[in-house]
Image (spheres, grey):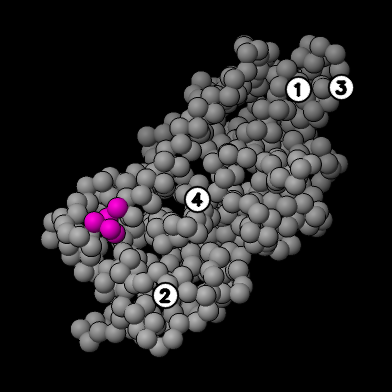
């Protein structure tokens, strides 16, 4: 966290999450339960930090939480917590919780009592007057409940999210058209890269803002334009991995361009070979293996500085090589792959495995693709980078369609605040009665574990999206 951040901003979402977990624990268990004690202790610790300079107010105003007078920024990883707390506040007509300085001295028992009263207030008429009286009678005078200031509740996140989704969508499809344009123009003469670099900068900005959304977009598999959509998907995956390992923004921009242009050479391979049903014969395979070198020749024809060309030429040349330098194209002047080449190799194979290919009988789900790649780690992929890629994507990668243990279908959206990447944020997909799967509610499986013990909701298996006739990216962009 930046030292310039205020204490409320720095601790705000931690405070929301701790209150959320405490409410759920108090709802479910007796006062002496260890889960309640742990959650209350977390709340006490944060109250102590937040009230160091006096009382602090947690206020709900126009569907945004404000802490200490500061609006808490929108965070995708907190969407479930924020949504549920908003509903909790609204149903009880709570405008704000004012934690007085004396809340620092409140006992765990007194905090549990106050929490139970707040939960129970929904069962009484005139919620706030009843709650205020009960808090005073029970000695919870360290907490003040205030009615909402504005009954006109609006979700200001809608506009912010809408702008982000529209920018992501337009950038994605503009990138496909740009790769297509460069591929064809490079066959006829020099072609500029100014537009490509602007798009690369936009992609880097979007990934810095919401990498999970951009990973979700890589589930777009346009068969008619597959060569180009594949290139854009590889660019997104590679750049997300580059960000995950800490590359600078300028290095990420170069990596994005590498991804966009890594398959330029396939335009020089006959379509009947690229899209052939079944295995290639020896002659066809030799033509296919030539596409990295053809791509390099196209990159050399780009109207770009020598410095830029030198930074974006190795990755496309190497993306079918293995760390032990087997693969293709074979060369005598290289003894080790570049970092860009190693990253593109991982992104390219993962994207190809998770796409429906006419020459392959089996469609791999994202988790199956990762397992297959891990089985070939060391020989086909850099082990350290592949580990980081798997960590970034999650056990069930972002964009996976999954079956949950209650029999419902879900879509893995994110892995918020979870280092092991095992318990994702899942969007339920609900049949609308016509066979179409619509957006349902969000479920954070990590919270389910906390709330429900050994019988918590979990993922049973991945499901190929084509089996359900859906495009996961549409749900990331809220088109369904």
Q: Secondary structure at mark 4?
A: helix
**Distance Cα–Cα, label 3 vs label 1:** 10 Å
Q: Foreground residue, 220 or 341?
A: 220
Residue that appears at 13% across and 61% down: 306
Q: Main secondary structure of the magenta part?
A: helix
Range covered by the magenta-colored residues: 181-185
Give the crowd class for mark 3: few <14, some 14-19, many >=20 residues within 10 Å: few
Q: Give whichever of discs 2 and 3 has the lower sequence position.
A: 3
Residue 91: numbered disc: 1
Q: Tag 2, which secondary structure? A: helix
Give whichever of discs 4 and 1 has the lower sequence position.
1
| Labels 2 and 4 touching (C-beta < 8 A) | no
Task: State which quarter of the image contains the N terminus.
Answer: top left
Q: Is residue 467 visible?
A: yes
On the image, numbered disc 4 is attached to which residue?
A: 217
Residue at image position (45%, 60%) is: 226
> Left or right of 44: which side holds 3?
left
Q: Secondary structure at mark 3?
A: helix
Measured Cα–Cα span from mark 1 to mark 2: 62 Å
Mark 4 crowd level (few <14, some 14–19, many ≥20, 10 Å Cα): many
Residue 419: % across, % down: 55, 57
Q: Quadrant of residue 140?
A: top right
Q: Residues within 10 Å of mark 2 (few under 14, many from 20)?
A: some
Identity of the residue drawn at 68% across and 31% down = 85
């Amino acid at each position: 966290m930046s030292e310039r951040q205020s204490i409320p901003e720095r601790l705000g979402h931690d405070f929301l999450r701790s209150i959320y977990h405490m409410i759920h624990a108090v709802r479910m268990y007796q006062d002496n339960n260890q889960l309640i004690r742990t959650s209350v202790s977390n709340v006490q610790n944060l109250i102590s930090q937040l009230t160091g300079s006096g009382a602090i107010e947690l206020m709900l105003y126009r569907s945004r939480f404000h802490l200490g007078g500061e609006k808490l920024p929108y965070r995708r990883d907190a969407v479930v917590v924020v949504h549920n707390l908003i509903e909790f506040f609204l149903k009880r007509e709570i405008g704000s919780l004012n934690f007085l300085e004396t809340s620092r001295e409140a006992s765990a028992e007194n905090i549990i009592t106050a929490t139970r009263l707040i939960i129970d207030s929904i069962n009484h008429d005139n919620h706030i007057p009843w709650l205020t009286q009960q808090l005073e009678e029970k000695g919870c005078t360290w907490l003040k409940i205030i009615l909402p200031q504005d009954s006109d509740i609006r979700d200001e996140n809608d506009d912010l999210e809408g702008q982000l989704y529209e920018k992501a969508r337009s950038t994605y499809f503009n990138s496909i058209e740009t790769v297509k344009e460069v591929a064809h123009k490079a066959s006829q003469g020099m072609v500029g890269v100014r537009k490509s670099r602007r798009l690369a900068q936009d992609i880097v900005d979007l990934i810095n803002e919401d990498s999970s959304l951009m990973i979700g977009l890589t589930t777009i598999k346009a068969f008619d334009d597959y060569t180009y959509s594949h290139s854009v998907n590889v660019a997104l995956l590679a750049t997300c991995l580059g960000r995950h390992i800490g590359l600078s923004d300028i290095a990420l921009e170069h990596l994005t361009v590498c991804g966009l242009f890594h398959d330029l050479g396939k335009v020089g391979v006959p379509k009947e070979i690229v899209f052939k049903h079944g295995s290639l014969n020896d002659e066809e395979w030799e033509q296919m293996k030539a596409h990295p070198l053809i791509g390099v020749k196209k990159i050399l024809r780009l109207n770009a500085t020598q410095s830029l060309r030198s930074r974006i030429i190795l990755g496309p040349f190497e993306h079918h090589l293995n760390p032990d330098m087997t693969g293709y194209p074979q060369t005598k002047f290289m003894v080790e792959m570049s970092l860009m080449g190693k990253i593109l190799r991982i992104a390219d194979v993962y994207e190809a495995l998770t796409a429906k290919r006419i020459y392959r009988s089996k469609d791999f789900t994202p988790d199956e693709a990762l397992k297959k790649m891990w089985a070939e780690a060391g020989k086909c992929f850099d082990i350290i980078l592949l580990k980081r890629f798997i960590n970034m994507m999650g056990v069930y990668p972002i964009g996976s369609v999954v079956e949950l243990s209650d029999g419902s279908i879900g879509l893995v959206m994110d892995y918020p605040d979870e280092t092991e990447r095992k318990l994702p944020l899942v969007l339920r997909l609900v049949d609308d009665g016509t066979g179409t799967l619509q957006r349902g509610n969000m479920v954070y499986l990590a919270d389910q574990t906390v709330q429900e013990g050994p019988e918590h909701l979990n993922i049973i298996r991945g499901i190929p999206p084509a089996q359900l006739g859906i495009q996961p990216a549409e749900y990331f962009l809220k088109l369904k």
